[in-house]
Image: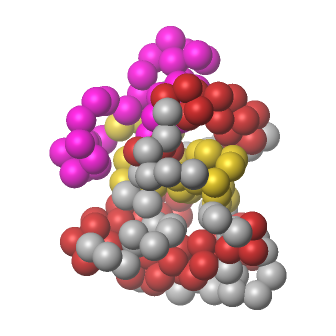
């Protein structure tokens, strides 16, 4: 499973694989704990077949990011995910991740894999392409993760459904 969050943290010290207790790993640990999986470090994820990354390989300057920036970053993300074979699940944690995957699939397969629409409307759809399952969800990183309890609950449910696939 590849979990794709939106963008890099303001400080590289907060990225998933950094030493200590980086904030991206903290909130991801909380999201997986909410779903019933108690991971504490990057090795726990990798040992369970889960790779954590971001759609944007630079930090956001503003809340909004241009389509051109997302499209350019999709090229980098494409190269990164091509290194993996046998991926069963992509968790798309936020709009930037969803858009990046759509750019990648459009370029590679001439198909937009994630339908248009609000995340809360499409997240429960069974979205599959050539045996790979896609879960559009909400971002589990950054300061907004702990703001809305309902989104945390939806993220936990999405993680539970994705984990059922990779554990079978």
Q: How is the image coloured?
A: secondary structure
Relative to 156, residue 61 above or below: above
Q: Position of residue 97 (x, y in %)?
A: 50, 44
Residue at the image position 31 percent from the left and 30 percent from the top: 115
Q: Which residues are magenta?
A: 98-126
Q: Which quadrant of the view contains residue 79?
A: top right
Residue 15, quarter of picture: bottom right
Is 43 left, or right, of 141 in this rendering? right
Q: Is residue 96 above or below residue 141?
A: above
Quadrant of the frame with the N terminus = bottom right
Query: Which residue does the image show at 50% across and 69% down from the upper left?
Result: 142
Q: Is residue 69 magenta?
A: no
Residue 156: quarter of image: bottom left
> Looking at the picture, how far across and down is residue 7, in whole percent?
58, 53
Task: Residue 4: tell me if it is visible.
Answer: no
Residue 99: within the magenta?
yes
Any part of residue 145 in sight: yes
Question: Residue at point 45% right, 73% down?
Answer: 143
């Amino acid at each position: 499973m590849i979990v794709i969050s939106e963008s890099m943290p303001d400080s590289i010290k907060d990225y998933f694989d950094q030493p200590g207790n980086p904030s991206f790993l903290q909130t991801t640990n909380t999201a997986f704990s909410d779903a019933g999986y108690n991971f504490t470090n990057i090795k726990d994820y990798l040992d369970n077949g889960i790779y954590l990354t971001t759609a944007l390989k630079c930090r956001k300057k503003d809340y909004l990011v241009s389509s051109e920036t997302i499209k350019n970053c999709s090229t980098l993300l494409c190269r990164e995910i091509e290194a993996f074979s046998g991926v069963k699940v992509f968790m798309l944690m936020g709009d930037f991740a969803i858009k990046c995957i759509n750019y990648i699939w459009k370029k590679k397969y001439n198909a937009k894999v994630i339908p248009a629409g609000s995340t809360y409307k499409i997240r429960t759809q069974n979205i599959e392409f050539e045996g790979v399952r896609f879960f559009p969800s909400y971002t589990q990183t950054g300061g907004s993760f702990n703001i809305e309890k309902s989104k945390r609950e939806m993220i936990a449910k999405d993680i539970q459904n994705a984990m059922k696939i990779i554990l079978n």
